[in-house]
Image: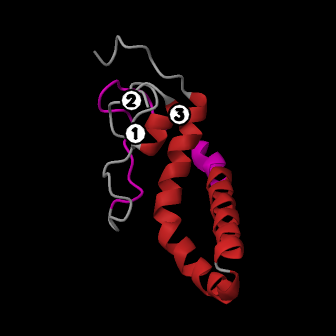
Amino acid sequence: MSRHSKLYSVFFNKCPRCGIGDFFVTKNAYNLKNFDKMHKRCPHCNENLVPEPGFYQGALYMSYSFYVAFMVIYFLIFVNFFEKYIDYFLISIIPILIILTPYFYRLARRAWLALFIKPSSNELSS
């Protein structure tokens, strides 16, 4: 996966423009003090990571889609491989979704911004 792709920036906490600067202040989504702190501008290329007030409301819908996709995949795995233990699906889904909340929050924000910013060519990151 190229450093200049949108998927790279979404999955590796990088700026969608340059692919080098970090999007969030910390790389760890489970740092309780700073899991939601993000840079206002990319430390490398100075791209504005907060284009306007309320911009990230759309990320709520992205996050919702990640939760739904995860639950469908998780359910299909249980139905196909652990049919005798389907009750465990119902017991385990809520704690797993709670544990994944910081990760999906960050993933949704990076994915939402990546929809609107075109990756740059190599001249900025060389």
Q: Which residue is mark 3?
A: 51
Instruction: Look at 44% across and 36% down and name the residue there.
Output: 9
Q: Which residues are magenta?
A: 34-60
Task: Identify whether 37 is placed above or below 5.
Answer: below
Q: Residues within 10 Å of mark 1 (few under 14, many from 20)?
A: some
Element under disc 1: loop
User: Badge 3 local density, few (<14 within 10 Å), some, or many (20+)?
Assistant: few
Q: CA distance from mark 3 to mark 1?
A: 9 Å
Lower position in the chain sequence, tag 3 or tag 2 = 2
Give yes or no for contact between labels 1 and 2 (Cβ–Cβ under 8 Å): no
- N-terminal-most mark, 3 or 1: 1
Circle 1 is placed at which residue position? 40
Label 1 vs label 2, nearer the camera: 2
What distance separates the C-alpha of mark 3 from that of mark 2?
A: 18 Å
Q: Residue at x 61, y 56 (%)?
A: 63
Q: Is 57 within the magenta? A: yes
Find residue 90 and report its image quarter: bottom right
Residue 29 visible here: yes
Give amino acid for label 1. Answer: Lys
Label 1, label 2: how many angstroms apart (C-alpha)? Answer: 16 Å
Q: Is residue 79 magenta?
A: no
Q: Amino acid at mark 3?
A: Pro
Marks 3 & 2, CB-CB < 8 Å contact? no
The residue tagged with tag 2: helix, strand or loop?
loop
Give the amino acid type for the residue marked by disc 2 in the picture: Gly
- Quarter of the C terminus within the rendering: top left
Whole-percent x, y for residue 37 in the image:
38, 53
Task: Tell whether 29 sits left or right of 61.
Answer: left
The residue wearing badge 2 is 19
